[in-house]
Amino acid sequence: MSELETKIAACEDEERSLHFPAFSNEDALQLGLALVEAAKSRGVAVTVDIERSGQKLFHHAMEGTSPDNDEWIRRKNNLVRRTFMSSFHVGRILERDGTSLQERYYLDPMQYTAHGGSFPLTVEGAGVVGTITVSGLPQEEDHKLVVSTIRKRLGVQPG
């Protein structure tokens, strides 16, 4: 299996296994704070955003980020809402297939981006209900920060 196929398989496993039993506003606060603390512990600056059913439940821009991070978050979130897959996952599929969002889905690059960092907020029995997003690092690092923090909150080990 190629490195790209391995990354795609890992994304599929993450999306299959990282489901919340329920997700309240308090859960969003605790997860958002955990993401901020994880970034601080790594010595990096990110913007963190958590949305459920179209409502922004958590948003924090650390020192060293800019309004550009908010724009990246908006575009990543749009893609996850459209595909129900992580933005990193979609990007790797497009890379494997040698195509783009514009070619495959006719999506406006000003509205959507397949750069890592946005992950579907999935609740057991309800499906994808929102997004959990980080912006500020290289895309794979954004993705890893989100996934590792969700894993820790849920107590789920890598598959």
Image (cartoon, rainbow, N blue to C red):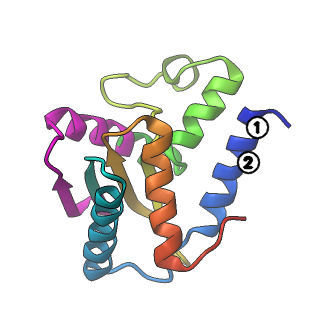
Query: Is residue 82 visible to the viewer in this orientation of the structure?
Result: no
The picture places residue 37, in percent across and down from the top left corner, at: 29, 65
Task: Name the residue rendered at 26%, 81% in the picture.
Answer: 26
Amino acid type of the residue tagged 2 in the rendering: Ala
Distance, label 1 to label 2, CA atoms, is: 6 Å
Task: Name the residue rendered at 50%, 83% in the picture.
Answer: 21
Compared to residue 112, the image places residue 128 above or below, namely below
Question: In the image, which disc is placed on residue 9?
Answer: 2
The picture places residue 27, in percent across and down from the top left corner, at: 32, 79
Task: Name the residue rendered at 52%, 44% in the picture.
Answer: 83
Q: Residue furthest right?
A: 1
Q: How many marks?
A: 2
Tell me where the magenta segment starts and ends, as one range. 50-77
- Are the residues tagged 1 and 2 within 8 Å (C-beta)? yes
Q: Nearer the viewer, residue 122 or 17?
A: 17
For residue 121, which quarter of the picture? bottom left
**Residue underneath mark 1:** 5
Q: Is residue 71 magenta?
A: yes
